[in-house]
Amino acid sequence: MTIVKRQDTTPQPVAEGRQRYLAYTEDLMVVVFEFEGGPTAQPDPPHNHPHQQITYVAEGEVLFFIEGVPHRLAPGDLITVPSNVPHSIQLLTERVRLVDTFSPIRTDFL
């Protein structure tokens, strides 16, 4: 068992204005991404990975692009991303917090 408390965690910087912290088991990973500096004029470059992904919007609003199609998401919304499908986001608010679940785990995040 692992307990990750936000106040006891030092998030890992990913890029300017972007950081993450996570917890994982053998087959499942949850990653909290925190973004600052929005809104942004353009979406991030698309990327893909072999992992299945579910994203929960905890704070802020984003355009979530799947294969180039935008989906406006707000707090409480969820979106699923199949394996190897190109996707990206565009921040619509100053701060955004996304909770991503991956299966299998993203060993590149460890």
Image (tube, helix red, strand yellow):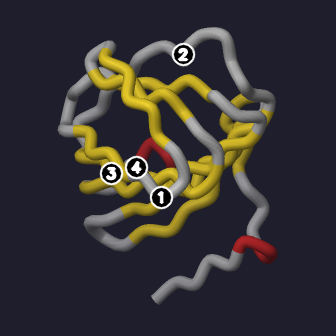
Give the vertical position of 94 relative to 85 (above or below): below
Instruction: Name the N-terminal-most of marks 1 and 4.
Output: 4
Quadrant assignment, res 51: top left
Q: Secondary structure at mark 1?
A: loop
Numbered disc in front, either 3 or 1:
1
Mark 2 and mark 1 in contact? Answer it, CB < 8 Å: no
Label 4: how many Cα within 10 Å (few below 14, some 14–19, many 20+): some
User: In this rendering, is residue 50 above or below 66?
Assistant: below
Q: CA distance from mark 1 to mark 4?
A: 10 Å
Residue 54, image x, y percentages? 33, 51
- The residue lying at 74 percent from left, 41 percent from top is 95
- Helix, strand or loop at mark 2: loop
Front label number (1 vs 4): 1
Q: Mark 3 or mark 1, which has the lower sequence index?
A: 3
Write down the residue under mark 4: 55
Q: CA distance from mark 3 to mark 2?
A: 19 Å
Q: Amino acid at mark 1?
A: Gly
Q: Secondary structure at mark 4?
A: strand
Which label number is shown at residue 76? 1
Percent across and percent down for residue 74 are 52, 45
Dot 3, crowdedness within 10 Å: few (<14), some or many (≥20)? some
Q: Nearer the viewer, mark 2 or mark 1?
A: 1
Instruction: Count neighbours of disc 2 (C-alpha within 10 A) and say few if under 14, some if 14 to 19, many if 20 or more.
Output: some
The residue that disc 3 covers is 54
Q: Is residue 103 left or right of residue 20?
A: left
Q: Residue furthest bottom?
A: 1
